[in-house]
Image (tube, rainbow, N blue to C red):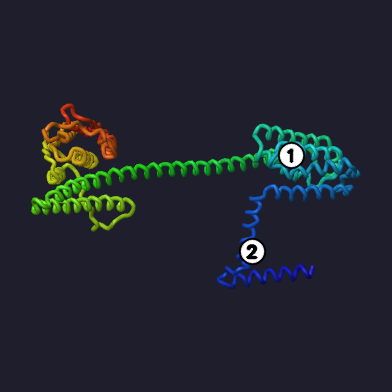
Amino acid sequence: MVADSCSGWSLAASFSAGRMRGGGQGPTYARIVRLPQDVRRWVRAHPTALDGVVAAALTVANLLSLSVRSYGGITFRDPDLLGVLVNVAAAAPLVVRRRFPAIVAAVVAAAYLTAGFLDYSMFSGSFAALLALYTLGAHAPMVPGLLLTLATASGVVGYLFAKREVLAAVGLQVNAWTVGVELLVYIGIWLIGRTVRARREYLAELEHRAERLERTASAELRAALAEERARMARELHDVVAHHVSVMTVQAAAARRMIERAPERSVEAMRAVEETGRAALVEMRRIVGALRNADAEESPSAELPPQAGVKELDTLIDRAREAGLDVDLTIVGEPRELPSSIDLAIYRVVQESLTNTLRHAGPTRAAVVLRYEPDAVEVSVTDDGSRKRGGTPRPADPERVGHGLIGMRERVTLNGGTLYTGPRSVGGFEVKARLPLEEART
């Protein structure tokens, strides 16, 4: 007793000292606070070990209770082999109660009732039976669990009526109140287990739903990234392919004229320089737009205007400088277009003229922009590469590549249609029709 008091005083002193150090958050205090959390974490991770400890403790208590001959005026049967087996069977199966809840509940309840009817002493029988019924509710299907619970409760009520004279001798009257309390306890503990099971399933469903949402969000993110990569590829191809093609043609012209007409060679190289600067401006616009999508920029950081129908004149002038004879015809009353359609028209014309320069070389091309009440249509045609006699050559079958695929994607995203193919009189034709009422921004 003295040693227990000293130990308690030492623990209290250490606890107080720990709280005073560091504003009440000393290492001793932290370890004491953390201990219950560690125990709970270990129990959740090792439920079978906990069940084994409980089953062993209850089994030992049952076996020790066999030596008790009487209690509260009730005389118990002398211990024998059957009594040992019944007391062990009433507690030991609890070690596997989570894996086999129905079997364990049936065995424990049967052993508990057998000990009662045969007058064997059993101190922990009621607790073991209640724990088995709770496990039925928490881990077994509803119908088998309810049937076993009702059978156990009925057995207990039968025991009360069978032993009512013995119980009356010790002051326990068996009546409707007693029966009602017994039924309430046994059925109530099963209902508590069902409630715990329902909550566990609800939380598991929430976790499963969260995982599904996370997987869906991840898939949507991958799809959005793929779409963004495709958009970036279209933009970069349209910008780089056009300007590099124009620069290649102009540089080749400058190389050929450098000895015969140096002044024209200088003009061609100046055009190369201007085209390169235009390419850089477009590249900065694309990169700036991409950065602006990921982080908010300051209001003063303005991006270059997006290319559109208004820039067609500049685009055609650059094509003419590269040696392409281009005519622009506008049919109908020009009007403001949605930004996506405006950009799509510009890119269609840009890619078409780039392909003409790349595959047909210096030749004649025509751009027709037609405004209709419910749609806008643009067509680009060329005469094909001409031989010395002036005869048009059929279109190059290799002209279908990334550029035409990108044009088709742009037009389709805006709800339009695109036709590309050779002309019957020679050359190549690109025609895009974009409905205004179905424009997608």
Location of the N terminus by quadrant is bottom right
Establish if 79 lies above or below 263. above
Residue 104, numbered label? 1
Residue 411 rendering spot, x and y as whole percentages: 26, 36
Q: Is residue 161 left or right of residue 47?
A: right
Residue 68 rendering spot, x and y as whole percentages: 87, 49
Residue reaching furthest to the top: 424
Q: Is residue 346 left or right of residue 93?
A: left
Q: Residues within 10 Å of mark 2 (few under 14, many from 20)?
A: few
Residue closest to the eye, 315 or 126: 315
Kindly report the distance in space between the C-alpha atoms of the residues bearing marks 2 and 1. 37 Å
Q: Quadrant of residue 168?
A: top right
Q: Is residue 211 left or right of residue 272?
A: right
Residues tagged 2 and 1 counted as in contact (Cβ below 8 A): no
Q: Is residue 93 left or right of residue 397?
A: right
Amino acid type assigned to the residue bearing label 2 in the image: Ile
Amino acid type assigned to the residue bearing label 1 in the image: Val
At 27% from the left edge and 50% from the top edge, which residue is drawn?
286
Q: Considering only order in the chain, which callout, 1 or 2, is on the residue closer to the N terminus?
A: 2
Residue 253 visible (yes or no)? yes
Residue closest to the eye, 354 or 336: 354
Secondary structure type for disc 1: helix
Residue 213 rendering spot, x and y as whole percentages: 46, 42
Secondary structure type for disc 2: helix
At 81% from the left edge and 50% from the top edge, which residue is drawn?
60
Residue 19 rendering spot, x and y as whole percentages: 60, 70
Residue topped by disc 2: 32
At 8% from the left edge and 51% from the top edge, which residue is drawn?
261
